[in-house]
Amino acid sequence: MNKDNYIVAATKPWSINAYKHICEDLPNWYLIKQKEDLSLEFIEKIAPRYIFFPHWNWIVPNEILSKYESVCFHMTDVPYGRGGSPLQNLIIRGHKETKLTALQMTNDLDAGPVYFKDSLSLHGSAHDIFNRAASQIMKLAFKIAETNPAPKEQTGEVTVFNRRRPSDSEIPEEMSTEQLYDFIRMLDAETYPKAYISSKGYRFNFDEANLSPAGNLSARVTITNINK
């Protein structure tokens, strides 16, 4: 690894854990976890070659994007699947695998040129997938830091995903067992609203879904009184 400085801006626990596992003891890598800490003043002190955004919840100011090469990571084979909630949108559409894309951040959401794409399985719960992706993201970040690649413009038909709302976690009617399994597992990660149904003043939240070879679905249920 060269002597340049690098910043990783991450908010989700799986991204922070991956950073700590791989980068915490490296002297020229820095972690930002809070929105207010991503200031131009702090960044200018570090003078990073790249700023990596594994999982960031806020719009990055143009004053940062225009001055520092910033890299985000999107869980689709862009330009397919630009936009919000990529994991959930992929699974609900029946995808079993995807591409983890490292792309340069621009003012247009997920529309920047691409550095690398890496295959990513969509097997398991959202927790499993995010943890698996976090490790791959850090490997891609290191690859970019080591090789300084020139990103290439996206090609192909643009498909945009809509960001899901908490109310979208309510389980729809008339789902097959496999569809219900996918619906529960795609929301089963820390900080995400669980799949749920509401009945007679109670909310039934589902996680830890398992689909047996015989097609039988089991899941953990947490029941809360929504009238309190």
Image: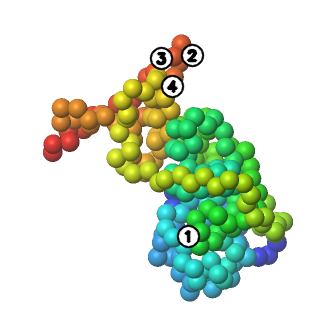
Label 2 sits on a secondary structure element that is: loop
Q: Which disc number belongs to residue 176?
A: none
Compare marks 1 and 3 and give the one earlier in the sequence.
1
Question: Pointer 3: what residue?
Answer: 216
C-beta proximity under 8 Å, tags 1 and 3: no
Given the image, on which type of amino acid does mark 2 rest? Pro
x, y (%) of residue 12? 51, 56
Compare marks 4 and 2 and give the one earlier in the sequence.
4
Question: Pointer 2: what residue?
Answer: 213
x, y (%) of residue 34? 48, 70
Given the image, on which type of amino acid does mark 3 rest? Asn
Residue under the point 54% across and 78% down: 61
The N terminus lies in quadrant: bottom right
Label 3 sits on a secondary structure element that is: loop
Of tags 1 and 2, the one toward the viewer is 2
- Find the distance from the CA under tag 3 to the CA under tag 2: 7 Å
Residue 97 in view of the camera? yes
Q: Which disc number belongs to residue 32?
A: 1
Residue under the point 39% across and 26% down: 174
- Find the distance from the CA under tag 4 to the CA under tag 1: 39 Å
Residue 144 in view of the camera? no
Given the image, on which type of amino acid does mark 4 rest? Glu
Left-right relation of 155 to 160: right
Compare marks 1 and 2 and give the one earlier in the sequence.
1
Q: Quadrant of residue 123?
A: top right
**How packed is label 1: few (under 14 Cα within 10 Å), some, or many (20 or more)?**
some
Question: Pointer 4: what residue?
Answer: 178
C-beta proximity under 8 Å, tags 3 and 2: no
